[in-house]
């Protein structure tokens, strides 16, 4: 029998996508097994869903770790953190755009060091389960190059997937459905993509769209969007399990080259 794809799910909230994925694994619609579920906060409802499905789960308390301001920190940065490398690869704040580690503010350095401490804890909890794919399902934290580089090698098929509540590249960020609705769009959607160093900028795996009708409220848009997400995410993971996703380079009008996903038939 073919080995099932080993999944690790990270979440922050209610976990309805995690539920859809665990259900698809259980029903056999998905050739995968959820080995572990992790959250960045104890209050994440998705943890109860994992428990109810008999799936191992853990919490890394991001808030406590990021707020740690003690000089002799309770959460020291991991010994293998190369802060200069991380700062070169990822730009989340206007003030971290300096190319030299020494040029960025103490606040930014502190944030990236604490985040790496949290990510080391994530890795220590995840890696024993030998995940083939990390599935972000409403995980409201940006992963840094410290984490990403320890999960996937440049040139290989990425190993971290995310679902975003908008038709990327429109409306990246934390409130995709809200931004879609407030913009007055007539169509909304969701996107499954691989994770890179940017914000919701990695190669697109799949998308689903739905109409936004006159009279719809933001709540209607969110409800319709989530219903699409529950179908889209398992179907994209199944493509990964079947080995049907490959990356190719596609030149852009700007002259830059973008990595895009091609789905093998
Ligand atoms: C979803 O809308 C997903 O697109 C976004 O966060 C939400 C998570 O919902 N990233 P749930 O926790 O899976 O119910």
Image: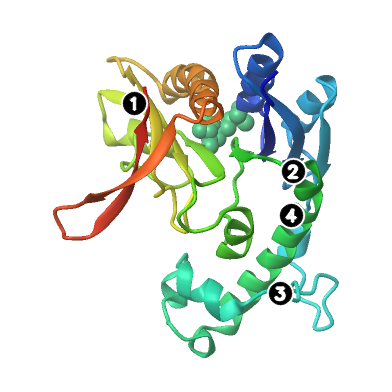
Number of numbered markers:
4
Q: Is residue 257 left or right of residue 93?
A: left
Instruction: Residue 188: give its label.
Output: 1
**Nearest the eye: 186 or 138:** 138
**Mark pair 4, 2: CA separation:** 10 Å
* Mark positioned earlier in the residue sequence (1 or 3): 3
Q: Is residue 133 left or right of residue 179?
A: right
* Mark positioned earlier in the residue sequence (1 or 4): 4
**Number of other residues with Cα within 10 Å of mark 2, as a class: few under 14, some 14 to 19, many 20 or more:** few
**Nearest the eye: 116 or 186:** 116
Q: State whether residue 178 appears in this view.
A: no
**Mark pair 3, 2: CA separation:** 21 Å
Image x and y of residue 222, in percent: 47, 24
Q: Which residue appears at 47% of the width and 43% of the height?
A: 194
Q: Is residue 10 above or below residue 55?
A: below
The residue identified by callout 4 is 123
The picture quadrant for ligand 1 comes to top right
The residue identified by callout 2 is 130
Quadrant the N terminus occupies: top right
The residue identified by callout 3 is 80
């Amino acid at each position: 029998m073919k080995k099932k794809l080993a999944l690790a799910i990270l979440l922050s909230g209610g976990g309805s996508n995690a539920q859809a994925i665990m259900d698809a694994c259980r029903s056999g619609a998905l050739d995968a097994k959820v080995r572990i579920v992790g959250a960045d906060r104890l209050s994440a409802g998705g943890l109860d869903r994992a428990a109810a499905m008999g799936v191992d789960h853990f919490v890394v308390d991001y808030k406590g770790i990021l707020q740690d301001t003690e000089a002799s920190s309770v959460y020291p940065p991991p010994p293998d953190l190369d802060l200069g490398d991380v700062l070169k690869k990822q730009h989340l704040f206007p003030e971290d755009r300096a190319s030299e580690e020494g040029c960025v503010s103490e606040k930014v350095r502190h944030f990236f060091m604490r985040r790496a401490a949290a990510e080391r804890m994530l890795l220590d909890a995840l890696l024993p389960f030998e995940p083939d794919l990390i599935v972000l399902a409403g995980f409201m934290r940006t992963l840094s190059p410290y984490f990403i580089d320890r999960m996937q090698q440049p040139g290989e098929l990425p190993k971290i997937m995310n679902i975003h509540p908008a038709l990327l590249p429109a409306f990246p960020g934390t409130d995709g459905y809200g931004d879609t609705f407030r913009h007055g769009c007539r169509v909304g959607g969701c996107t499954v993509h691989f994770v890179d160093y940017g914000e919701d900028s990695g190669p697109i795996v799949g998308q689903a769209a739905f109409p936004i009708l006159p009279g719809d409220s933001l709540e209607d848009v969110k409800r319709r969007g989530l219903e699409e997400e529950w179908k889209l995410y398992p179907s994209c993971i199944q493509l990964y399990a079947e080995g049907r996703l490959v990356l190719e380079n596609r030149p852009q009008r700007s002259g830059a080259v973008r990595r895009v996903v091609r789905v093998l038939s």
